Image: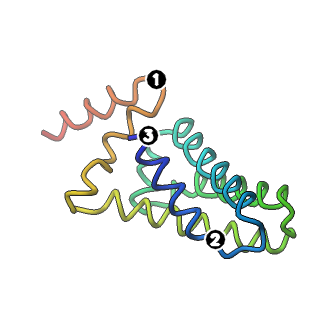
Amino acid sequence: MLEQLKSLAMQKLMQKMSGNSLNAEATSEAASEGTNALLESIKGGDLSQITALFSGGAEGKGIADNVQGKIKEVLQAKGMSSEEAETESASTAQDLISGLKEKFQSNAEEDSAFDLSSLTGLLGGNAGDLLNKAKNLFG
């Protein structure tokens, strides 16, 4: 699951950022660091925030804001102006999360690996156990 998320996030970020004012190497580095920020946010987030992020709930906004902030920081470090980095990061982070959300909400066979319940393996603690107990409560 982690590799699929990482690959998809990198692909989405590279697509979205390909036309920016940075060179290809700086864009690739920014996309890679943005992907890492997303994965770290998922690993460090709580299950309700992560589920909300990929299902459209407001509780996922903290993770989205973190990813946007990291992308902006990286773009500026690579030489982009603050204003351009703000615009680029807002658009890019939103597109990234929307693309991932589509995968988690899809019923297509090729998207079957993107299952919210499989995210529990990325989380620390006993999130997987808690999710299984919650599933058992509802049959």
Residue 137 percent location from the top left of the image: 19, 35
Of discs 1 and 2, which sits in the foreground?
Answer: 2
Q: Which residue in the structure is indicated by mark 3?
A: 2
Measured in 3D between alpha carbons, the distance from the residue under mark 1 to the one under mark 3, in whole angstroms, is 17 Å
Q: Which residue in the structure is indicated by mark 2?
A: 18
Residue 120 percent location from the top left of the image: 38, 35
Task: Work out which quarter of the rendered image holds the N terminus and state it.
Answer: top left
The image shows residue 90, relative to residue 7, as above or below, that is below
Residue 109 percent location from the top left of the image: 19, 57
Q: Nearer the viewer, residue 6 or 90?
A: 6
At label 1, the amino acid type is Gly
Pick whichever of labels 3 and 2 is earlier in the sequence.
3
Q: How are the residues colored?
A: rainbow
**Of the numbered discs in the image, which one, if any, rests on residue 125?**
1
At label 2, the amino acid type is Ser
Most extreme residue toward the front, as rendered? Answer: 24
Residue at 55% over, 43% down: 39
Most extreme residue toward the left, as rendered? Answer: 139
Name the element at disc 2: loop
- Crowding at label 3, few (<14), some or many (≥20) Cα neighbours within 10 Å? few
Task: Work out which quarter of the rendered image holds the C terminus and state it.
Answer: top left
The image shows residue 13, relative to residue 124, as above or below, that is below
Residue at 45% over, 55% down: 8
